[in-house]
Image (cartoon, rainbow, N blue to C red):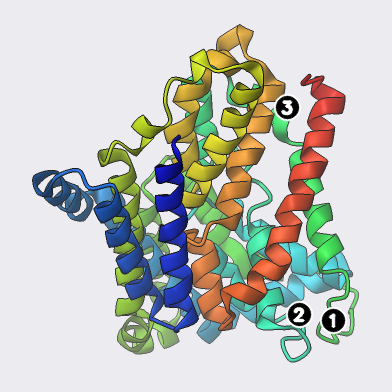
Amino acid sequence: MNILVIIKILTIFIILIILMRFKVKIGIAFLITTVSFILMFFYGWANIGRTIFKTLSSWETWRLVLSVYFILILSSIMEITGNTKALVNSIIHSLRNKRLAAIFLPAFIGLIPMPGGALFSAPMVKNVIDAKKAKPAVLTYFNYWNRHIWEFFWPLYPGIILIGSIFNIKIFDITVHLWIFTPLMVLVGYIFTRNLIFVDYKIIKGRYLKSFLKSSWYIFFIIITLLVFKIDIVIVLASVLIIDMIIYSKVREKFIEIAKKSFNINTIVLLLAIMLFKTAINDSGFMGYIGDITKLSLIAKYSVITLLPFIMGVLTGITVGFVGIAFPLLCSIIGTGDNIKYSLLALTFIAGFSGVLLSPFHLCLILTKEYYKANFKDIYKILLPSVITLLIASLCIIIIIGKLF
């Protein structure tokens, strides 16, 4: 990767930072950033036109838009029906530990690999953590961080499935070698939020299983339909909304009002810009600037297998993005099938996932930030040292257990 490419990438992020600094609407800011990327890595007007058409005509794009929109509607319905409060109460009183309950809420929602899923748990977290005594950035970080603790091994996540396909290995083997990073991530999150003050709930002993199941049935419904029946997420979420309308008369009466209130054109523009950015990375031939890594020295190879996934993680803001783009290029170093080096796989995954966590293009981060009305500067004050700590601790684990070097 030559210096000019690095300068272009840095310029793109500077543009985004300036736009956010001047409080340009987030959807417009990301659209301008995406256009900047396309112009800097210009690949012909006809090809750019095809990229735009491909993005707008792709079911993947509209699956994302509809999924986020349905999540917003469902979150509002949960508030109206009292299911959010009931779920929070059942978890708090069952676990009898406020911090554990606060971590459990976004983590529980995180079992469902839906786009922007952190937005689903954001209202719940606000019911447990004292929002008056916690900064919006801290609330954003807490919800965002704990939402993603399962991505290292949970078989529902597309990134894990894709890793299995690329390296010709079983999902079980991925789980066995990468699960250790989930408790590590929880520990790092605790270290950086250990001074949180929680809502003053009086823990009441009792049986809360029935209340928990009644208020969270939709989560189990989504997990089962996705994992067992492999039904499209849009159909699943739409089904949940229909069932809610059948069960609750209040939802039927106010559904149109809820749907209108949940529709946000700025969010739609944001989602379209992110999908356009993702498509442009592939269509622009950006990966051609990386070069042939098999000809590099040992030190250079280790640099590439960490930097490449990290950069792709930052640019795409999604695990399946850095896995799908970077990992096929790394097979010659990491190995495949029975010859795979799991220590290297862990290293590359941690590097890429760190990029995803830090990415300003990460949908969960953006939507949670908007929900809590936080700003990126304050968020990164806690997010950046957390990711650095996670990286260093992970590297120590990989060296000790995997004997990387």
Please tell me how crowded label 2 is: few (under 14), some (14-19), or many (20+) other residues with Cα within 10 Å: many
* Residue closer to the observer: 65 or 232: 65
Residue 347 in sight from this viewpoint: yes
271 left or right, relative to 142: left
Residue 351's label in the rendered image is: none
Instruction: For the N terminus, give its image quadrant.
Output: top left
Q: Which residue is mark 1?
A: 197
Task: Kindly indicate whether the residue at mark 2 contacts the one at mark 1 (C-beta within 8 angstroms).
Answer: yes
273 left or right, relative to 21: left
- Residue at image position (32%, 54%) is 37
The mark nearer the N terminus, 1 or 2, is: 2
CA gap between label 1 and label 2 equals 6 Å
Q: Secondary structure at mark 3?
A: helix
Amino acid of disc 2: Ile
Q: Position of residue 324 (x, y in %)?
A: 43, 34
Residue 129's label in the rendered image is: 2
Q: Position of residue 283 (x, y in %)?
A: 25, 40
The mark nearer the N terminus, 3 or 2, is: 2
Task: Kindly indicate whether the residue at mark 1 contacts the one at mark 3 (C-beta within 8 angstroms).
Answer: no
Q: Residue furthest top?
A: 338
Please tell me how crowded label 1 is: few (under 14), some (14-19), or many (20+) other residues with Cα within 10 Å: some
The mark nearer the N terminus, 3 or 1, is: 3
Q: Secondary structure at mark 2?
A: loop
* Above or below, 36 relative to 284: below
295 left or right, relative to 271: right
